């Protein structure tokens, strides 16, 4: 143990409870009920009573607010509550905010959660009434309507500049699907993927095909964060928040990051600099990674951003089974957003915890460190977890 | 079809576009162009701005070809192209648009298989006041 007082949040807190509902294209319960179930499951997993919770963190897009959740599940008096913005970019930030709050004494037991009926509910891009003036006025009238279109634009440029191919994107989709095929909770548990299926699937926004896009899922997840002393008394092996970061680069424009010197260098690079600066570990020390995968193309970009390879090498990195179990960097071992469930990346956090407890359905033998990231391509966040 | 929902900063762009002029916002003090428009200059923090005419020539920086599901008016023309064009004078100023066969032509009037990154294009305004692009 190398943690010392005065080193910020390093190893000061741990994730001690995780909970989730079922994942499906359609669940009958509403989002509030799903949120309550996930949160109570996480507290039960930790062995902590709801009345002890005094800190909360979620996403700005979360529809179940603190008041509704707290009064439904019976939280105590809350002294810290925060929300992180930018959709899936806020996933790891929820845990980061709790870790910071607990490390500096603003809370003692924190809960982070995300509940979303994205499978049976509306697709946000179909809402034409709330077309945001900036930057939508510059993009949507021309038919650049969906996140898939916005990221496809960067993907095309990435493939063009660095010689990456659709086979590299397939490697990402395949690794996630293979792990989902090991995970009974995954939406795609019994649905293997082949290269032929991938290459002949319908386009969504060329160069992205159906299998380059994440699932649309109903479900909820939660986790519980406490200080390191308290963590030793919980039911499961603590999973320490070793390092955490948010990242909003100078002159960044979100998913339509077309208007700066280097649009392909996104928030991952900014988050990574902070993450590694405050860590005792390097990318070579990471045993398993849960990298935000709303689209396959975010993986090669993130592999570069977080320092697993050099600029433009993210495609080649995926070759020779590098992302599979036993490969150089096993990826998204629950199946991720592409093949387990798309709940704005929160399942990547809980899967990171499972790996470091040794309880994943696709366990990396002896995994002791896990990188978890939020969405590249939007203001983002990341966690470096260790056991 | 969606029309631009403008804001204070962006309105001049669309007013010039409605007259068939392509202009970009530039700092009134240091002269640095910026896009999208915003209240002040990120280089020198000046609130002075001007709208600088540009030639309307550029190159395709990237493009996509959306397929359904899409909003109905767009699904009716799918697959169509959306391009990002970097301006000849200011390569870091890139505009989202469509490559069409001629001014006023539909979004699917160019075969997507013929689009190339780096291809020279020039601006063309149709009746809707939106800047689109034709092969140069």
Image (spheres, rainbow, N blue to C red):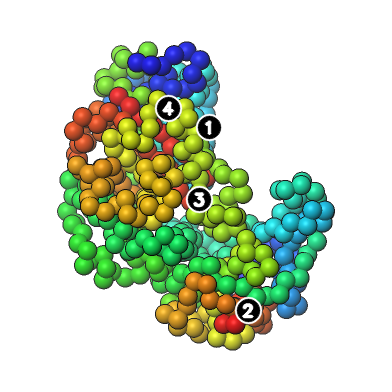
**Mark toward the viewer: 1 or 4:** 4
On the image, the x and y values in percent for residue A320 come to: 22, 52
Q: Is residue B118 visible?
A: yes
Question: Gap in Å between the C-alphas at discs 4 and 2?
Answer: 50 Å
Q: Residues within 10 Å of mark 3 (few under 14, many from 20)?
A: many
Q: Quick check: A116 above or below A195?
A: above
**Mark toward the viewer: 1 or 3:** 3
Question: Gap in Å between the C-alphas at discs 1 and 3?
Answer: 28 Å
Name the quarter where the N terminus of chain A is drawn. Answer: top left
On the image, the x and y values in percent for residue A180 come to: 22, 48
Identified at 19% across, 56% down, the residue is: A191
Chain letter of the residue beneath label 3 in the structure image: A
Q: Quick check: A199 above or below A274?
A: below
Query: Which type of secondary structure does the marked residue at label 1 adopt?
Result: strand
Residue that carries the numbered disc 2 in the rendered image: B122
Residue that carries the numbered disc 3 in the rendered image: A265
Chain letter of the residue beneath label 2 in the structure image: B
Q: Residues within 10 Å of mark 1 (few under 14, many from 20)?
A: some
Residue that carries the numbered disc 4 in the rendered image: A279
Identified at 27% across, 28% down, the residue is: A368
Which residue occupies the foreground of this view, A328 or A354?
Answer: A328
Question: Gap in Å between the C-alphas at discs 4 and 3?
Answer: 22 Å
């Amino acid at each position: 143990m190398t943690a010392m007082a005065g080193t910020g949040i390093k190893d000061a807190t741990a994730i001690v409870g995780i909970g989730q509902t079922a994942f499906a294209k359609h669940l009958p319960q509403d989002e509030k009920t799903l949120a309550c179930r996930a949160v109570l499951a996480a507290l039960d997993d930790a062995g902590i009573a709801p009345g002890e919770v005094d800190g909360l963190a979620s996403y700005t897009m979360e529809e179940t607010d603190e008041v509704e959740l707290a009064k439904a599940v019976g939280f105590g008096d809350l002294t810290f509550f925060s929300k992180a913005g930018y959709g899936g970019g806020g996933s790891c930030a929820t845990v980061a905010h709790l870790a910071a709050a607990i490390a500096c004494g603003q809370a003692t037991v924190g809960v982070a959660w995300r509940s979303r009926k994205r499978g049976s509910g509306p697709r946000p891009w179909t809402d034409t009434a709330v077309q945001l003036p900036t930057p939508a006025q510059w993009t949507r009238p021309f038919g650049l309507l969906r996140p898939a279109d916005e990221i496809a634009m960067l993907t095309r440029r990435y493939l063009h500049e660095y010689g990456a191919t659709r086979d590299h994107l397939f490697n990402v989709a395949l690794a996630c699907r293979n792990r989902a095929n090991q995970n009974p909770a995954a939406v795609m548990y019994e649905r293997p993927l082949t290269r032929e299926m991938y290459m002949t699937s319908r386009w969504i926004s060329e160069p992205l095909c159906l299998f380059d896009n994440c699932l649309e899922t109903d479900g909820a997840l939660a986790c519980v964060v406490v200080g390191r002393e308290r963590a030793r008394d919980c039911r499961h092996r603590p999973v320490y928040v070793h390092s955490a970061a948010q990242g909003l680069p100078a002159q960044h424009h979100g998913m339509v990051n077309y208007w700066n010197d280097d649009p392909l260098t996104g928030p991952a690079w900014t988050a990574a600099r902070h993450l590694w600066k405050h860590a005792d570990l390097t990318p070579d020390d990471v045993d398993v990674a849960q990298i935000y995968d709303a689209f396959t193309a975010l993986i090669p970009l993130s592999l570069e951003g977080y320092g697993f390879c050099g600029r433009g090498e993210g495609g080649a990195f995926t070759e020779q089974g590098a992302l599979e179990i036993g490969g150089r960097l096993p990826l998204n071992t629950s199946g991720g957003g592409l093949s387990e469930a798309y709940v704005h990346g929160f399942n990547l956090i809980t899967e990171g915890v499972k790996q470091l407890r040794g309880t994943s359905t696709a366990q990396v033998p002896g995994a002791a460190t896990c990188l978890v990231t939020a969405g590249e391509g939007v203001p983002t966040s990341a966690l470096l977890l260790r056991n | 079809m969606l029309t631009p929902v403008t804001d204070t900063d962006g309105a001049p762009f669309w007013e010039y576009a409605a007259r068939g002029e392509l202009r970009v916002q530039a700092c009134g003090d240091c002269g640095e162009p910026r896009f999208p428009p915003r209240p002040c200059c990120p280089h020198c923090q000046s609130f002075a701005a001007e709208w600088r005419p540009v030639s309307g020539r550029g190159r395709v920086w990237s493009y996509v070809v959306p397929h359904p599901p899409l909003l109905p008016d767009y699904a009716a023309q799918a697959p169509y192209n959306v391009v990002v064009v970097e301006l000849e004078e200011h390569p870091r100023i890139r505009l989202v648009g469509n490559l069409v066969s001629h001014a006023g032509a539909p979004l699917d009037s160019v075969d997507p298989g013929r689009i190339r990154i780096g291809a020279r294009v020039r601006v063309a305004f149709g009746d809707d006041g939106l800047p689109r692009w034709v092969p140069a």
